[in-house]
Image: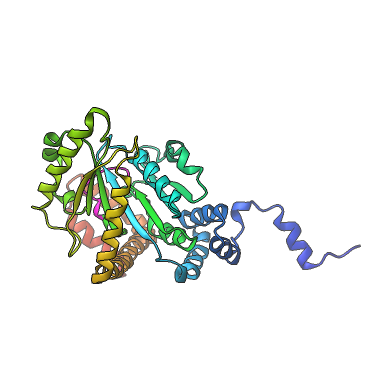
Amino acid sequence: MRKWSRSMDERKYRKFIKRSQLEPNVDEYCNKVLDRDRMFLSKAITLIESNAPRHERSAGELLQRLLPHTGNSIRIGITGVPGAGKSTFIEAFGFMLCELGHRVAVLAVDPSSAIRGGSILGDKTRMEQLSKHPNAFIRPSPSEGTLGGVHRKTRETILVCEAAGYDVILVETVGVGQSEGIVRGMVDFFMMLAITGAGDELQGMKKGIMELVDAIIVNKADGDNVELAKKTAREFKQMLHFVQSPTNGWTPRALPCSSLKGTGMEDVWEIIQQFAKETKSSGVFESRRKKQAKDWLYSLIDARLQKLFFEHAEIKKLLPKMEHQVMSEEITVKKACDQLFTVFNGK
């Protein structure tokens, strides 16, 4: 009887293993990403976004290897009121940058269903022209309920895109909300798209959002809207003078543009370049990046502790009982929390 070698047996066995169950080759992923292979860039992001425990170690090792090749980009966060035309703006703005020779990565986040958790992920269809440009990379991801309108692994995705040679990173959020500070905490320059009709707009705008932005872009400044858009931009500019700037030494700007006509895009890019030049010269740019890294560390610690708590065997048994007692008002919420942590700490 013919004897099969161990290596031949393993190769034969691997044919019957689902591809998703095979451990990714970190060396191959790293080399391909650095070689600017777009297919492997997508696969690397999928690996990083994976919830499978078997992928966490490989994703961590990949990020560590890519880290020396990151940081050489301008990270731009883009939010906006409903109907402001974020996707249209990003396509026009990103296409202009690609034509100028920049490599643009768009991290577009779609809201996930609160009921089933699904997401349409239609950004590539909304940015059809940009998605075909060889200098552009568009990655739609579900928000998965994450606050701030970003995916929970957006920070890691930014690093991988930078390692792949993209020098402009555009992070599109699902919309304006109280938790947009999360986006502010992972980008260099944060802009908000607004629309004409300054009276209602100014009344409905939260001061908290105004304190986060480095620029307000009044979109849809075309046709009969041109003069109204200019007026709206002037009113925003006046309002920004009464709000503390989120960036030391920088005065937030407000200006009109038209995504449809492509007008004003050069002005937006000029402001971003001016921002980068001034903040790098003053040291604010680098200090912000360092603070963001520290904040990221603490957010991961919080997430890890929460995971350890809810995966604790005794907590799993006790939690339903505590929930019932709290809802039936048999025990205070604080008392229930104290009892749960007593069990968690093994006391």
User: In the visual, does 33 lie left or right of 344?
Assistant: right
Q: Residue furthest right?
A: 1
Q: Was residue 40 drawn as part of the magenta stretch in this picture?
A: no
User: In the visual, does 204 lie left or right of 285?
Assistant: left
Q: Nearer the viewer, residue 64 or 68?
A: 68
Magenta: predominant secondary structure element?
loop
Range covered by the magenta-colored residues: 174-181
Q: Residue 144, how many percent across, how many down?
A: 38, 46
Q: Is residue 136 above or below residue 222?
A: below
Q: Residue 298, how many percent across, how many down?
A: 30, 67
Q: Give the position of the N terminus as an image quadrant.
A: bottom right
Q: Is residue 211 above or below residue 59?
A: above
Question: Can residue 184 be seen from the camera position used here?
Answer: yes
Q: Was residue 175 drawn as part of the magenta stretch in this picture?
A: yes
Q: Residue 193, how many percent across, how many down?
A: 26, 43
Which residue: 36% across, 55% down?
A: 317
Q: Nearer the viewer, residue 35 or 48?
A: 35
Residue 110, by quadrant, is top left
Which residue: 45% across, 43% down?
A: 130
Q: Residue 231, how many percent across, how many down?
A: 15, 38
Number of numbered discs overlaid on the protein picture: 0
User: In the visual, does 163 lie left or right of 81?
Assistant: right
Q: Residue furthest top?
A: 224
User: In the visual, does 114 lie left or right of 181?
Assistant: right
Q: Give the position of the C terminus as an image quadrant.
A: bottom left
Which residue: 36% across, 51% down?
A: 171
Q: Nearer the viewer, residue 184 or 8?
A: 184
What colour scheme has been applied to the protein in the rendered image?
Answer: rainbow
Question: Can residue 142 be seen from the camera position used here?
Answer: no
